[in-house]
Image (tube, rainbow, N blue to C red):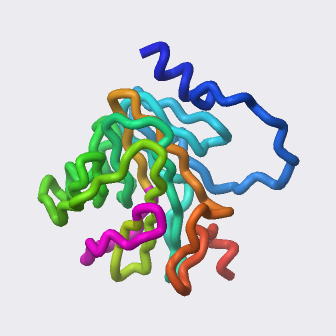
C-alpha cells in the first residue's frame, strides 16, 4: 500500500521538472465529493487510493470533452455520475447514478453491462470522454470505442474510480488527442454566459 501511495505522490519516480507557471484551471477533482479512502493530489488532477471522486463542475455546455491517463494499472473506472452516486466503491456503474467504462472493458450503469470493449485500456493509455447531453462516448488513444451510452438525464459530473494500486490523471485542457468535432474542454457555468 505504501509503495502505491508513494507512486501517487511522487509521479511514479520520474524526475520533477519545473514547468512554467500558468493560471491553474479552476476545475479539478472535488475533495468534498470523494470516497473515504481516496487520495487526490497534483492540484486535484490525480486520484489514487480506493473509491471515486467527482469533479467540482458539472457538464453544462452542449458538447464537453475530457481525457484520463491511466498512470498505473489496477482496478479503475471513468465516466459520468450524479452527486448521489456511491463514491466508496472501486468500480463505476454500480448504481443508477453512474455510467462508467471499467478496467475490464465493460461499460456499466445500474449494475448492467451496456457494452463490452474487446481491447480494454492498459497502463499508459489515454481514455477520452465526450458528452453532449444526448450521448456519452469513450475513446481509446484517440479512436472511438463505438459504444455510445444514451438516456443519461440530470446534472452529471465527470467521475473517476480507483482501487488495487490504480492511479489516474485527469486531463482537462491541452489534450493528448484532438476532441471530436465541436467538442471542447469543460467550462464553468459562468464561463458560458
Residue 48 in the image: above or below residue 108? above
Q: Is residue 52 visible?
A: yes
Residue in view at x 20 percent, y 49 percent:
94
| Position of the N terminus by quadrant | top left
Residue in view at x 52 percent, y 74 percent:
64
Query: Where does the image place residue 82, in percent across and percent down from the top left?
Result: 36, 58
Q: Residue furthest left?
A: 112
> Does the magenta segment cover residue 174?
no
Residue 155 in the image: above or below residue 67? below
Q: Is residue 33 visible?
A: no
82 and 40: which one is in front?
Answer: 40
> Does the magenta segment cover residue 153?
yes
56 and 104: which one is in front?
Answer: 104
| Position of the C terminus by quadrant | bottom right
Q: Quadrant of residue 131?
A: bottom left
Residue in view at x 86 percent, y 48 percent:
21
Query: Where does the image place residue 57, in percent across and percent down from the top left?
Result: 55, 60
Count the marks: how many? 0
Q: Residue furthest front?
A: 119
User: Left or right: where does residue 154 sit relative to residue 109?
Assistant: right
User: Left or right: where does residue 14 sit relative to residue 179?
Assistant: right
Q: Residue furthest top?
A: 2
Judged by its main secondary structure, the magenta piece is loop
User: Left or right: where does residue 90 sit relative to residue 130?
Assistant: left
Q: Quadrant of residue 93?
A: bottom left
Q: Residue furthest right?
A: 20
Residue in view at x 71 percent, y 56 percent:
25
Query: Where does the image place residue 67, in percent across and percent down from the top left?
Result: 51, 59
Instruction: Tell me which segment is drawn in magenta.
Output: 140-158
Query: Where does the image place residue 177, in percent across and percent down from the top left?
Result: 56, 67
Amino acid at each position: 500500500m505504501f509503495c502505491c501511495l508513494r507512486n501517487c505522490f511522487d509521479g511514479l519516480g520520474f524526475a520533477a521538472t519545473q514547468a512554467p507557471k500558468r493560471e491553474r484551471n479552476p476545475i479539478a477533482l472535488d475533495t468534498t465529493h470523494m470516497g473515504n479512502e481516496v487520495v487526490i493530489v497534483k492540484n486535484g488532477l490525480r486520484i489514487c487510493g480506493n473509491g471515486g471522486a467527482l469533479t467540482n463542475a458539472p457538464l453544462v455546455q452542449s458538447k464537453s470533452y475530457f481525457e484520463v491517463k491511466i498512470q498505473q494499472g489496477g482496478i479503475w473506472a471513468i465516466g459520468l455520475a450524479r452527486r448521489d452516486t456511491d463514491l466508496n466503491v472501486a468500480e463505476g456503474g454500480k448504481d443508477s447514478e453512474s455510467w462508467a467504462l471499467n478496467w475490464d472493458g465493460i461499460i456499466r450503469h445500474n449494475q448492467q453491462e451496456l457494452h463490452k470493449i474487446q481491447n480494454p485500456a492498459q497502463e499508459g493509455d489515454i481514455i477520452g470522454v465526450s458528452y453532449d447531453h444526448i450521448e456519452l462516448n469513450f475513446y481509446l488513444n484517440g479512436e472511438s470505442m463505438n459504444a455510445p451510452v444514451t438516456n443519461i438525464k440530470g446534472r452529471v459530473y465527470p467521475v473517476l474510480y480507483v482501487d488495487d494500486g490504480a492511479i489516474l490523471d485527469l486531463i482537462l485542457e491541452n489534450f493528448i488527442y484532438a476532441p471530436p468535432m465541436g467538442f471542447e474542454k469543460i467550462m464553468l457555468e459562468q464561463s458560458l454566459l
